[in-house]
Amino acid sequence: MKILKTIAEIKEYIKQFKCKDELIGFVPTMGALHEGHLTLGKEARYECDCLIYSIFINPTQFGPNEDLDKYPRDIGGDLAKLEAIDVDAVFLPDEKMMYPDNYKTYVKVEDIGKILCGKSRIDHFRGVTTIVSKLFNIVECDEAYFGKKDIQQFIIIKKMVEDLNMNVKMISIDTVREEDGLAKSSRNAYLTEEERKAAPIIHKSMIKAKEDLAIHFSPEDLIEDVILLISEEPLAEIEYIELRRSKDLSKVEDLSEEGILLILAAKFGKTRLIDNLLLN
């Protein structure tokens, strides 16, 4: 497995695949890798001739009061996990490499970057789309793999790819969960023992909403029941619960529609967790 730390190194590395018109698959990450991250690569391995991961904790997607300095880091452990799933190369740039002095250019997807998580995390998605567009340009990937847990992020990046005519096929993989339903996330490490026991209420509430979809009269009626169930857990602090169309995150007006996505964010102590579930 190649470790590539500069843009020049990775550009040189991918030439061997480009000249033979071989398929390059790419998984961008911020490290602290768990089974969710690795599942993306395992899926990509079936289709791609070359599989590249990146590990870069992107400062531009963190707000002033967020956890950039505390974000978990385990480069040695991450590299061992990637080698075990037969990754060909890992791109490990530093901040100076990605954002040199006098850096001024950002990519922003309007509207869908301002709803849901975008309401409380101002400029978060601007940071995401900027770094991902840079990585796509550097790696020159044919396919890019993302988990469905961050569904708003996936839809925003997909829109960016479409609008900017990027030649990248976007592929989403189902959320990987713990046995109790909690979505695997690097931020789960922040949960206290009590908060970790409480956090599966998120998945429990979504499953109940899916099972009871047919008995609700309106989106507001369904959301109210989800709020009531999560509120039974005193450690859960709801940030938002919404029903959105899975194709573009527009608002659901009628529960008879297809492709209804229940999407939510909640805090357990200081740890903010997000999740979603396709209801029909």
Image (cartoon, grey):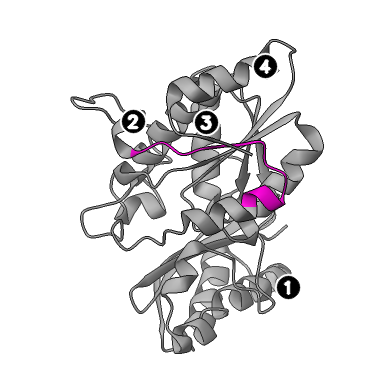
Q: Residue drawn 53% across and 86% down? A: 197
Q: Quadrant of the C terminus?
A: bottom right
Q: Are marks 2 and 1 in contact (CB under 8 Å)?
A: no
The residue located at (32%, 63%) in the rendering is: 70
- Label 1 or label 4, whichever comes before in sequence order: 4
Label drawn at residue 97: 2
The image shows residue 223, relative to residue 116, as above or below, that is: below
Q: Which residue type carries mark 4?
A: Gln
**Nearer to us: label 1 or label 3:** 3
Q: Earlier in the sequence, mark 2 or mark 4?
A: 4
Residue under circle 3? 159
Mark 4 vs mark 3, CA separation in Å: 30 Å
Which amino acid does the dot numbered 2 rest on?
Met
Q: Mark 1 highlights which residue?
A: 211
* Segment colored magenta: 82-94
Q: Which residue is mark 4?
A: 16
